[in-house]
Amino acid sequence: MNINNINVNKYPISQILDPESKTIYEIPKYQREYIWGTKQWEELFNDLMENGAGYFLGSIICINTTQDTLNNPKFEVVDGQQRLTTLSLLLAALYVTLDDNRDSLDEDQQSDILQLKRKLVIKKTQSEIRIVPQVQHKNLEDYMGLLADKKIIAPHQTPKFAGNRRIFQGYNYFKRHIDRELEASNNKVATMFEILEKVNTAILVMIEVSNHSDAYTLFESLNDRGTPLTSLDLIKNLLLARLDITDSDNLDYYFDRWTQIMDALGDDDSARERFFRQNYNAFRKDMNVPFLVQGDDRLYPLGTIATRSTMLDIYEKIVVKDPSKFLDDIYENAQIYSRIILQNTDNLTATVKEAYLDLQRVGGVPSYLFLLYLDKKKDALGIDEALYVKIIRFLITFFVRRNMTDVPPTRDVTRLFMAFIEEMEKQSYTGESIYTKLREKLIAVSADDAVFEEKLRGPVYKENTGATRFILCMIAKQSMTAESQKNLWEKNGSNQYIWTIEHIFPEGKNIPDVWVDMIASGDRDKANEYLEEYAHTFGNLTITGYNSSLGNKSFKEKKERKDSNGNPIGYLNGLNLNADLVNTDNWTVDQIKARTNKLVSEILALFTL
């Protein structure tokens, strides 16, 4: 890599967005539009909240485009624009929260509100924003409209349907989660400033180059770098080093044992590390027993929870204490986990396997720690297969509703299951009482039917595509018989689903004339309004096996489409989900609304807590 001028510096967010500076970060129009969604917002917020000050957020690559020393310093963001834009939305949500609570703040704290505003808007200006999103898909206009709406900049018109796009959705996500943190706090002011401190002290590495050629070379190099050591590599190295001291004659056996553990967990490093975190979080009481010291009242001296940042420290202590016992325990638990994640399906009944599959499909990964605990202790707890499957099926319903409503927040779910395990141990729950008490606990923290229904009537495809697909598939599955069975989860050679979500009224921005005529009687402006408001609702969504072949075709063509063998691959494909489409020759907003009503009723009945 040959780059002439490069500056690499590690800065906290408070310095990158220094209120006293006039530095501007501009995202050029050739960059990708803002595409981060719930998954990335959730990861960023959870990482900041779960880790201490100075958490490392990653790097950004910038080109210094300042014309002369009299102008404000300006950087063109080549890589990291999604993260920077997201941080600005989080800061905007924090600003509004602090400003709404201004009367509860002292003079110094009130001055921090202005400082926070200056992270978003250049000092002594009303509308010169510090982070300038690119213009595609109305990113810049939506951002300006959002800041104006929140009184952060001077009045600016908000584009139509901005609330349905990602800038506003990202802001609303962070505002909602900040509010939840405050609701759970005994000291709201302290909590607000704790969140602000975590953001301010988070670290970004800023890589500054002088031209686009260098930026591209650097970007390619960073994305083609070698694989660094993982936490598990470090644990393995420590484990084998300790065993070499205590039992060197059997080192080959121990190495093979470790390899068997990794094989049981599959090839995905992130899934392997997740197992180690969940293993500790499931069995923390037992794992802390050797570390309890008289005079130390802590129940969990190793740590209350294993996170990405604490896991290595926890397991280092366990390995050093007794490496042989650690290896035996982790091997046994990995075999159980291997079945839960369906890495090993030997000896699984069809009923259990299908339950595991549906839990995996709905994104129920946080509950794996609970199932690991139940499976290992099933005999002592009096859990047979029927009860075990009943518990998994309830977890599936819980996660459907959680994923659609975002209640409870994802970062609370792990602690929720950990707390229930602790409650089980204290109260000695066994058998059916485990299901009963779990159900009570999860209902208490879940959104009610009114909130769930409200979410189901919204643009579900945009808000949570994965959960939407799962729900549609589960509806379609209800009426399948042995003769009409279709594997809606089948994947092709590229590991992509063959059966995918199909928008009946096409979702693309360039609405075909035939659809403008059908949906809006030739009124293109009205058709665009309908696109924003109804295209992503349940009433306009179905499942087909050949989505790409349907696309923007007319309703009639979509319905009657056949493959080269004459088999129906359009809406006549036999799925009950398409029953409303079979006997009609057109598709209107009224039909979308009616079908939404019908499907929402079915979903509420199917996923009742």
Image (cartoon, grey):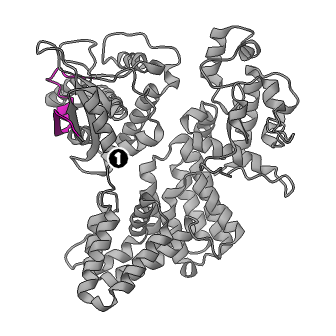
For the N terminus, the image quarter is top left
Q: Is residue 105 left or right of residue 561?
A: left
Farthest front residue in view: 2
Magenta residues (range):
2-25
Q: Is residue 445 left or right of residue 435?
A: left
Question: Horizontal and vertical percent for residue 20?
Answer: 13, 23
Badge 1 crowding class, 10 Å Cα cut-off, few under 14, some 14 to 19, many 20 or more, is few
Asked if residue 118 shows in the view, the reply is yes
Q: Is residue 121 left or right of residue 598?
A: left
| Residue 391 vertical placement versus 226 (above, below) | below
Is 278 colored magenta in this rendering? no
Task: Name the residue tied to disc 1.
Answer: 224
Q: Give the camera-side residue of 603 and 243.
A: 243
Question: Horizontal and vertical percent for residue 389?
Answer: 65, 66
Q: Give the camera-side residue of 453 and 171.
A: 171
Amino acid type shown at disc 1: Asp
Q: Residue at x 40, y 41 (%)?
A: 180
Q: Give the camera-side residue of 230 and 389.
A: 230
| Residue 102 vertical placement versus 351 (above, below) | above
